[in-house]
Each structure stands twice: as C-alpha cells, then as structure tokens.
C-alpha cells in the first residue's frame, strides 16, 4: 500500500485554506492509502516563541484534524517532536545539501520579505521537511502548486544521500491539489503569515467579521476576491444568477458567503467541541508510538550507512 504524508504547523488557528489545501485532499486520498498526518510543532518554532500558546495549539490542531473528518483509527496522527529522528535526519541532510540550493527557496524569501525573522531554522526549514517526508518512505505528498518546491527539496536530499551512501530513500511524488491556493481576504493566498484568513472553526460572528473584511474591487461588476472564495462552496451555475442579481451589492454577496461558510463549518464545529484534551493526548500517544517505531527502523539503516554505528 502506498503511503501518503502531510502535516500542519500548530502556529495558530486553522483556517479554510488549511482545510481545502491540506485536510480535504488528505481525506480524499487517505481511505485507500497508508496515511500519516503530522503536527509539525518543531516547524512552528521558526515563528512561534510563546510556550503556553504552542502547547495549546498542539492540542487544538489535533482536535481540528479529527473534527475535520480524519479518523485516528485509520490515519496515524502524531507530533513531530515525539519522534526525535526528524531532527537527527534533518541535520544529516543539512550536511549534504548546499547553501546556494537552499537560497533558491521561494517560501523563505517570501516570508522574509513579509517581515518574518530570518532565523537559521526558517532558512533550513526545507531540509527538516525533507526529513519529515523521507523518514517514512513516503510515496505521495499532497501540496499546493506553491509548495511543490518543498517536495523537490525532499527529492534533492534523497538523491544526495543515495548517491553518497547507497540507495536508502524513496524519492516522493507531489500530488498537486486543485483549489489548494485558496485566496485570503486580501486576494493573496490564505495564510496566517499574511493575516488574511477565515477561521475554520470560528463562530458565526468571527466568520462574518473575516468575510466582511474581504477586499473588494469597486471597478468591476463582480467582486473577484469574494467570488473566488465563494466558488469553493457553490458551483458556478449557482453563483452566476446570485452575482448577476446583486451587481455592485457587495454587502449582500458577502452575507450570502457568510451563510454558506457557516452551513459548512457548523457540523465540524459541533464535533470539535465534543473532543476533550484527554482524547487528544490518547490519539497522539497512540499515533506517536507507531511513527516512532517506523522512524527508528529507518534511522538504524541511515546510521549504519553514514558510519556512526560502531
């Protein structure tokens, strides 16, 4: 059975872009594949420096996974930090991949341009992500087109290692997901870094506040940003008469979008409220044990190959 792997940072509240870009594609593929879903808490340290917030976010994002439809009895849900082999393998890859190659990373340059701290962790982020993926002999990584480069870095790390020490790692394939680059309230890709998100499990008032903040272009008949988000929830056949009837009536269109998002989110929000912190800890303990065993087996081979086993 092929293995699929993905992960999300516990760096804040999940938003609709996370769901349609990562969770929904994972759900659609996971029933027929060996599925692993990681809480990327070490990755979150590149931007999040509040320990109490990180602890709560780890619990919340796991709860979010399950509320969004991930079945912990079928998918392995685990914390990155529970498997120390991730950081160990990430360091090994840092000793193989060149600085000039890392300097080509679009995500790093974009985040620094947006004002994020240019720390070494953010710079080496692609190689820890490569370790995340390669540690489990992953076949498929569901990503948006803007994240394709991360999987290319994983293939580069695998190739460098295999050439130096012999065939050890599979070279994973990305699965580009339609709609993964969901626009945010400002028209850019929806991202916590850009502060342009619509919360996945927000209250109706929180959803309304975010939707009403969507930037509209008064020069056209159809508000492009509102329509782009709305098209995720309704077909074009349904949207066309709605937008033709409400030309220039941006308030009515936004109110319609609020109702559609609320109808979609409400059942998941109710399920989320029923999942306790103890439930989450049990899920992570169970998933972490499986992930740890798989990673330890792989790293025994890696350590032997690089010569540190004596």
Image (spheres, rainbow, N blue to C red):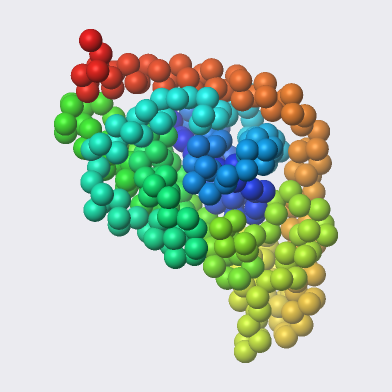
Is residue 163 visible from the viewing direction of this image?
Answer: yes
Question: Where residue 188 appears, x then y in whole percent?
Answer: 54, 67
**Residue sitting at 23 percent across and 33 percent down?**
161
Specify the farthest residue to the top: 310
Residues 123 and 61: in front is 123
Quarter the C terminus occupies: top left
Quarter where residue 246 is shown:
bottom right
**Residue sitting at 49 percent across and 46 percent down?**
46
**Residue sitting at 25 percent across and 13 percent down?**
309
Question: Where residue 10 appears, x then y in whole percent?
Answer: 60, 42
Quarter where residue 106 is shown:
bottom left
Question: Where residue 94 appears, x then y in whole percent?
Answer: 29, 38
Quarter the N terminus occupies: top left
**Residue sitting at 81 percent across and 53 percent down?**
203
Eyeballing the image, is 241 above or below 5? below
Q: Please give left or right for residue 169 compared with residue 132 in the image.
A: left
Is residue 175 visible from the viewing direction of this image?
Answer: no
Question: Where residue 69 appears, x then y in whole percent?
Answer: 67, 38
Q: Please give left or right for residue 93 compared with residue 56 in the image.
A: left
Q: Please give left or right for residue 61 compared with residue 305 in the image.
A: right
Residues 258 and 201: in front is 201
Eyeballing the image, is 231 above or below 92? below
């Amino acid at each position: 059975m092929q293995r699929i792997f993905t992960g999300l940072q516990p760096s804040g509240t999940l938003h609709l872009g996370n769901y349609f870009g990562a969770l929904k594609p994972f759900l659609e593929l996971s029933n027929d594949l060996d599925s692993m879903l990681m809480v990327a808490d070490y990755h979150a340290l590149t931007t999040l420096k509040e320990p109490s917030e990180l602890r709560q976010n780890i619990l919340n994002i796991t709860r979010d996974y399950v509320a969004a439809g991930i079945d912990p009895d079928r998918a392995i849900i685990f914390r990155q930090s529970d498997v120390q082999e991730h950081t160990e393998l990430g360091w090994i890859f840092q000793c193989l991949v060149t600085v000039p190659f890392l300097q080509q990373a679009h995500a790093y340059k974009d985040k620094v341009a947006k004002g994020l701290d240019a720390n070494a962790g953010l710079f080496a982020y692609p190689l820890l992500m490569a370790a995340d993926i390669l540690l489990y002999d992953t076949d498929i990584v569901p990503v948006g087109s803007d994240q394709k480069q991360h999987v290319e870095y994983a293939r580069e790390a695998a190739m460098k290692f295999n050439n130096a020490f012999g065939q050890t790692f599979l070279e994973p394939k990305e699965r580009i997901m339609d709609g993964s680059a969901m626009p945010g309230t400002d028209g850019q890709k929806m991202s916590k870094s850009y502060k342009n998100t619509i919360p996945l499990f927000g209250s109706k008032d929180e959803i309304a506040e975010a939707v009403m903040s969507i930037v509209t272009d008064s020069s056209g008949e159809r508000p492009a940003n509102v329509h782009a988000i709305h098209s995720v929830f309704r077909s074009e056949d349904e949207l066309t008469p709605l937008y033709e009837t409400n030309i220039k009536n941006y308030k009515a269109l936004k109110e319609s979008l609020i109702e559609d998002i609320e109808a979609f989110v409400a059942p998941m929000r109710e399920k989320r409220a029923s999942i306790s912190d103890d439930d989450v800890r049990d899920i992570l303990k169970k998933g972490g044990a499986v992930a740890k065993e798989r990673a330890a087996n792989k790293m025994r081979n890696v350590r032997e190959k690089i010569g540190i086993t004596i």
